[in-house]
Amino acid sequence: MQPSVHPLTPFVDELPVPPRRVIDQPGRLVVGLEAGAHRFHRDLPPSRVWGYDGLVPGPTIEVRRGVELEVRWENRLSGPFPVVSTVAPQYAVDGVPAQCLPGRSGGSPDPATAALSGYSVVHLHGAMTEATSDGWTENIAAPGQAVLDVYPNDQRATMLWYHDHVMGVTRFNVYAGLAGLWIVRDERERALELPEGPPYELPLLLTDRNFDLQADGSLGGDLLHKTDPEVMECFSPFTCVNGTVWPHLDVEPATYRFRLLNGSNARTYRLVLTRDGEPDLGRVTQIGTEGGLLAAPVSIPAQGLVLASAERADLLVDFSDLEPGTELTLWNTAAAPFDGSGADPANAGRPDLEGLLPYPEVLRIRVGEGRPNRRRVPEVLATDFRRTSRGELTGAVVRAIALVEQEAEMEGDPPMLTMRELVLDPDAAEPAITLVEGQDVTRWRTVATRFEDTTTFFPMLHEPEIWRLINLTGDTHPIHLHLDAFQVLARNAATVDLPADGITAGGTRATVRVGEAPEDGVSHELDANELGLKDTVRVNPNEVVDIVVRFEVFCGRYMYHCHILEHEDHDMMRPFVVMPAELMPFMDMHAGRR
Ligand SMILES: [Cu+2]
């Protein structure tokens, strides 16, 4: 078979589980950032990778709530850089777009990427950490250097992940393999007697990867980060689970707990489980999200479980009624780039070439022998989380951020994505953003557009704020805040009137009618699984998403950004500084109040 058509046999490799480092006592752990070799599939030669302890994914660190752990991240990386980066011309072979073909498709390797030698920053995503241990993107460690970070782990039980966050090249370092999982356990979770540890609790880290061709034309070992000239994101054709392309998992007729993370650079998944070719989502119950347990278990959405980059789901999956020999398959049905559009779950398993999804395979599950062992799903999960209502937010600071696509300054470059911080200004001259909400019309002036611009967000410790994320682009952006998890208050449908010259280097002009239904056929509702605590939220086109942000413990300088890593690197990232109240009178602060 031609590599371009279907080069790898699905479901032949067993699902690997990353090694666990279970921490019971406060202490120190040494993790090395190392070059290594990793086999992504039985039919592939080993690929060069960069991983934590040389592994892809890195070891899973499991720690009890409140057990402080110091990690000495020892950067022992060495070149040459294991990823070939290239821009491929736009064409298709047998309908498969060049971007989704293995091999460079005529693109030449980017020499700047090839020269990367291993500068790194480690960030523990979703963690409540002091600013000095949060992995500020510019606090770069060279190979041969080490960074000591302190993680208090004093937060609700959930699954976090640690990954590279270095300025400008996060997309390449993470793609090279620098990512691993981190699980916090607590008493509440233990009291619910949820599956903990193998074999019934399994982390599933999803990534899409592509591979170069070898001299003889066979699918080779080198990781390949390929984009096309118009779209800056990398959408790779092969879905890996825990670092293996399309693995299989043998299960007993029992209830399993799957801890899912989308660790892909850009690809969004909508996961559909099928049995005998039919959707079989009813056996899946979601109990948690990025910020930990939901208040109560929920079914996953009828079309499937959507996870954009960095989103996570804690699932209970009941196989106890199934006969030995039963096979189930997990498929992806989300087109790329993702824009919130739905897909009929009955079509799960069909490639979508236009949607850059030539291979929808994710995971095959085979039910084996055993005594059926069903676990009751608790009716009440979290007892330490209650949703904040709008009424409780009267007088809260309101901030607004526009997500925009800006034409490249250099002819031929892909467009740049930026986040524009806005300030409420009734007298704002053009260019300005006009928000229309019924009778309420507000004007917003752009005060920051690039990462390097002056900080304008100084949220006050303990004080709730509303951040409004206004999407002026045609794609979904998963927006991630460092530090405390947040609550999604509302996903508002909106119509966007963006003039052709609306986006300039320093200004933004658009009219956004919040609450007015666009004719895009997309559901703009919040899903039940978005009602818990989140650290990453999808903002679809034609939406204004309102989140309630409250920083409770740590002050200092942190970041928020789009978690499509190609966007984060160019330049959808901004700083914010959490301030204690007593220092606020000394700050020159920009914020709207309502
Ligand atoms: Cu983005």
Image (cartoon, rainbow, N blue to C red):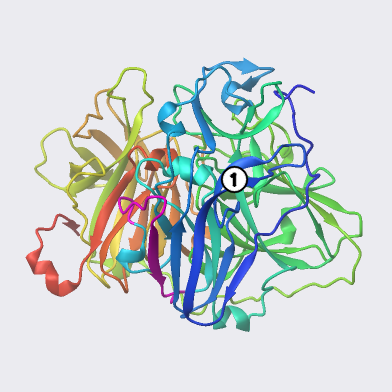
SS under mark 1: strand
Residue at x-position 14% and y-position 54% = 590
Residue at x-position 91% and y-position 60% = 323
Q: Is residue 441 left or right of residue 103?
A: left
Foreground of the two, 594 or 90: 90
Residue 461 vs 447, above or below: the answer is below
Over which residues does the magenta segment extend? Answer: 136-155
Q: Residue 548 occupies which quadrant of the picture?
A: bottom left
Residue 196 position, x and y percent, is 67, 73
Type of secondary structure dominating the magenta stretch:
loop
Disc 1 marks a residue whose amino acid type is Thr
**Visible residue check, residue 6:** yes
- Image quarter in which the N terminus is found: top right
Q: Crowdedness of circle 1 by 10 Å Cα count: few (<14), some, many (20+)? A: many
- Image quarter in which the C terminus is found: bottom left
Q: Is residue 360 left or right of residue 529?
A: right
Residue at x-position 52% and y-position 68% = 292
Residue 502 vs 82, above or below: the answer is above
Foreground of the two, 70 or 282: 70
Query: How many numbered markers are drawn?
Result: 1
Residue 27 position, x and y percent, is 47, 78
- What residue is disc 1 on? 207
Q: Is residue 163 left or right of residue 463?
A: right
Q: Quadrant of ligand 1?
A: top left
Q: Is residue 137 magenta?
A: yes
Residue 516 position, x and y percent, is 37, 41
Furthest residue in direction front, as rendered: 144
Residue at x-position 48% and y-position 45% = 78
Foreground of the two, 536 or 414: 414
